[in-house]
Image (cartoon, grey):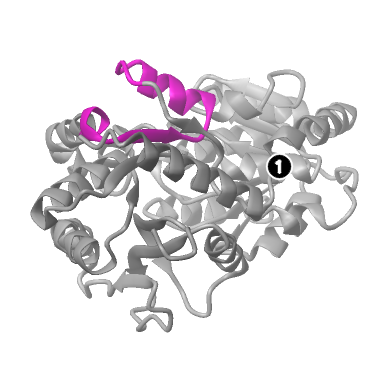
Amino acid sequence: MTPGGRPRVLFVGRGRVRFPLGRGLELRFEALSGELDWRQIGTAADGKHSPDPRLVLARPFPLRLLDGPLYYGRLPGRIARELRRFRPDAVIAQGAQETALALLARRLARSKSAVILDLHGDWRAPTRLYGSRARRLLDPLADALARSALRRADAVRTISTYTTELVRAEGIEPAAEFPAFMDLQPFLVNSVVSPPEAPRALFVGVLERYKAFDVLADAWRRVARSVPDSVLHIVGQGALAPVAERLLEELPGRVEWSPSLTAEDVAAALDSATLLVLPSRSEGMGRVVIEAECRGRAVVGSRVGGIPDVVVDGVTGLLVPPEDTGALAKALERVLSDHALAERLGAEARIRVEPWLATPEEYARRVRDLVDQVVMSGTIT
């Protein structure tokens, strides 16, 4: 630990960092600085050198196809170097596969740092539902790495009831369960406004298979026919961007697309919407659901992952089976066609979201408590 008694913690992830830092990252790092002496391994999204020595960022490889394999292939060496230089009390790795690589790095560095698996979702999803379908070839390796990490990590932290159940199914009890860091101030600063009279759905997320954007596109073709003047606002980008482009061409005036928005603009988009739609195939929790409920908006989502932990079917939104285009279309039609229902669901959502709200300082204290608990237990494997 540092002379001031703060634990040294090395955070490991694939997160892409841009400079100047966005408000959310600034708040997260500032809060963590009050509790920890930290370093963060990640990626420089724009390839720029980090002005903060605590951010140990890799530059993206010019050929995108090789960027991921090269990042993960080099990750054990990068972690090992930081273990020798920084000598952290603990490593917190976001993701099961990343944790397996952190455990390998610990052996390479002959370090005694505790390694904590920070589980934000189903460890089987990255190769099955992200990016190219060719990733499925990596399923056996990714699954083996994940299960090795679950068995060998010194502790596991989960973010929701769903992720806790995933871990318990493997015979492991999480050391802590608390939500991921969320900067909710942009969604709480203004008073909640009533949903608009004009029917409008909002999707916010990466355009990838795990978010089931392809399912939403098919459902929206039905909704556009059955709900006059309804509009779908898409916010995001990703491998399924061509699906959004086709939808724009097929349904002019009924679809809008914003590749990216600031948090403040997402809050404004929620205020302009009747509901949020999140039809994911896999979801650890769904931060955008929390954001929508802060703005008093109903959520139409799939009954999968951590979404049911946040959305109460028939009370704060409507839940449908994953990949069921017909059920998704019917749920969207129901809420978009009934303004009173949208208001009732949204009002209850704003009430029930309260337990999910936490300040950056509360989040940092929970991380500190987790590290103290694991380090003091002295059960490094």
Task: State the residue at coordinates (43%, 79%).
Answer: 52
Residue 227 % position (x, y):
74, 34
Query: From the viewer's perspective, is 110 left or right of 356?
Result: left
Eyeballing the image, is 249 above or below 333?
below
Residue 193 % position (x, y):
90, 48
Quadrant of the snapshot with the C terminus: top left
Residue 68 % position (x, y):
22, 58
Task: State the residue at coordinates (43%, 65%).
Answer: 3
Amino acid type, callout 1 = Leu
Query: From the viewer's perspective, is 158 left or right of 226?
Result: left
Foreground residue, 79 or 252? 79
Q: Is residue 227 visible?
A: no
Q: Is residue 343 visible?
A: yes
| In the image, residue 168 lies in the stretch drawn in magenta | yes
Task: State the residue at coordinates (64%, 54%).
Answer: 360
Q: Is label 1 in a helix, a strand or a loop? A: loop
Foreground residue, 200 or 292? 292
Eyeballing the image, is 338 above or below 119?
above
Quadrant of the snapshot with the N terminus: bottom left
Residue linked to disc 1: 357
Image quarter of residue 274: top right
| In the image, residue 71 lies in the stretch drawn in magenta | no
Eyeballing the image, is 202 above or below 122?
below
Query: From the viewer's perspective, is 262 left or right of 137?
Result: right
Q: Residues within 10 Å of mark 1 (few under 14, many from 20)?
A: some
Q: Which residues are magenta?
A: 149-172
Task: State the residue at coordinates (44%, 37%).
Answer: 373
